[in-house]
Image (tube, helix red, strand yellow):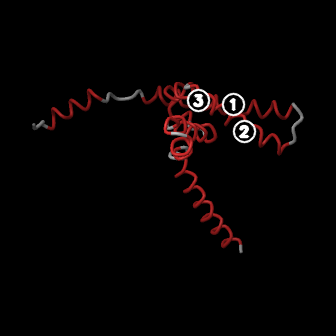
Amino acid sequence: MSISKSDYSKMTDKASPNSPIILNCIKAFVIGGGLCTFAQILNFVFEKAGLRENEVRLATPSVVIIITAILTGLGVYDKIARHAGAGTIVPISGFANSVVAPALEFQHEGYILGTAAQMFSIAGPVIVYSTAASVVYGLIYYLATK
């Protein structure tokens, strides 16, 4: 069966309509900014609670990670991401989601071959390449300042 280029183009246009780019950018900005604002509020709350600076630096991302993991497990984070798009890929929350989502998806295959094996299927390459990049940058910095 042969389809002409114009017929194929019409089929693809119908199957994948254009996204409202401006609206998507606004949603990403507002929701991503909201996530960052929430983290900053947590920061202020921990400071007012009397935590030392080092403790605040540990507590804020820890709470964001835990909340993201819980929301991912409940399926809420995916609904937020459907509207926010790139706005939910704020580093800590996006990373937590990228670890928890595959772990949940493959849990039916067991703890070892399912959850544990697939947990870093999305986040693993990020960890590998960011670690390698940090070593390269560290070497460049060391050689440049020597």
Is 26 placed left or right of 42 in the picture? left
Residue 41 appears in which quarter of the rendering?
top right
Q: How many marks?
A: 3
Q: CA distance from mark 3 to mark 1?
A: 23 Å
Nearest the eye: 141 or 123: 123
Callout 3 environment at 10 Å: few (<14), some (14 to 19), or many (20+)? some
Q: Confirm or deny contact between disc 2 and disc 1 (CB under 8 A).
A: no
Residue at point 49%, 38% (across, down):
106
Looking at marks 3 and 1 on the same chain, the residue that comes earlier in the sequence is marked by 1
For mark 2, what is the residue?
A: 62
| Residue type, label 3 | Gly
For mark 3, what is the residue?
A: 73
Q: Is residue 96 above or below residue 82?
A: below
Q: Secondary structure at mark 3?
A: helix
Looking at marks 2 and 1 on the same chain, the residue that comes earlier in the sequence is marked by 1
Q: Nearer the viewer, mark 3 or mark 1?
A: 3
Q: Is residue 70 above or below residue 92?
A: above
Residue at point 15%, 38% (across, down):
5
Q: Secondary structure at mark 2?
A: helix
Residue occupying the far right of the picture: 50
For mark 1, what is the residue?
A: 37
Q: Residue 97 at what x, y percent from top left?
A: 57, 37
Q: Nearer the viewer, mark 3 or mark 2?
A: 3
Is 69 placed left or right of 118 in the picture? right
Q: Is residue 112 above or below residue 64?
A: below
Is 109 placed left or right of 37 in the picture? left
Which labelled disc corresponds to residue 122? Answer: none
| Residue type, label 2 | Ser
